[in-house]
Image: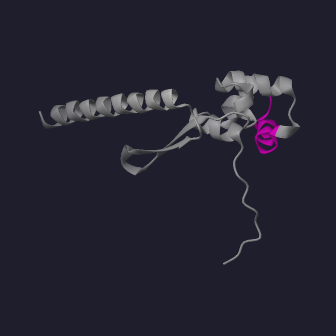
Amino acid sequence: MESNEKYERPSAIRLIRESNGFSQEFVAAKLEITQQAYSNIEKNPENSSIKRLKQISEVLSVPVTSLIGETEHYIQQNFQQQGGQAATIIHVQGIPENERQLYERYIEQLKSEIQMLKSMLNQKQSG
C-alpha cells in the first residue's frame, strides 16, 4: 500500500523538546510567541533567526548547534504506556567514549534505584 504523504524526519528541535517532556505550548509561552509560530519553527528551523535559536536553546538547555544538527547529541524519549510503565528509546549519535561510559554508569545507577523503589513498593503493598 503506497502513500502519497512524504515522511519527514522530525527536527532536532522537536526531538530535544520532546526528550525534555515539554509541549509546544510550554516552549511557545517561554518564548512569548504562539504555539503555531513555534510549530513553524520546529518544521522549518532553517528559516529562524540566530537570536530565536539562541532563545530556544536556552529554554531547552542545549547548545544552539544541537538545534540545527551540527553536533552529535544524546536524546532520551519516554513514552508513557498503559499501566504506568514507561519505555525508553535512546538515540546516541557519536558521543565520545568517556561520555558514553558516564551515561551507561548513570543508567545502571538509575536501574538499581528503580529496582529498590519497586521492592519497597511491593513490601508496602503486601505488608
* Left or right of residue 2: residue 111: left
Residue sitting at 66 percent across and 25 percent down? 62
* Left or right of residue 30: residue 85: left
Most prominent secondary structure in the magenta stretch?
Answer: helix
Nearer to me, 102 or 5: 102
Q: Quadrant of residue 71?
A: top right
Question: Residue 18 magenta-drawn?
Answer: no
10 w.r.t. 24: above or below: below
Point out residue 33 in the picture as x, y percentages from the top left corner: 80, 29
Point out residue 90 in the picture as x, y percentages from the top left corner: 51, 42
Tell me how many marks there are.
0
Nearer to me, 118 or 9: 9
Residue sitting at 67 percent across and 30 percent down? 26
Residue 32 visible in the picture: no
Residue sitting at 36 percent across and 30 percent down? 110
Tell me which segment is drawn in magenta: 32-45
* Coloration of the structure image: one colour
Point out residue 122 in the picture as x, y percentages from the top left corner: 19, 36
Q: Quadrant of residue 40?
A: top right
Q: Quadrant of residue 85?
A: top left
Point out residue 77 in the picture as x, y percentages from the top left corner: 53, 41
Outermost residue to the bottom:
1
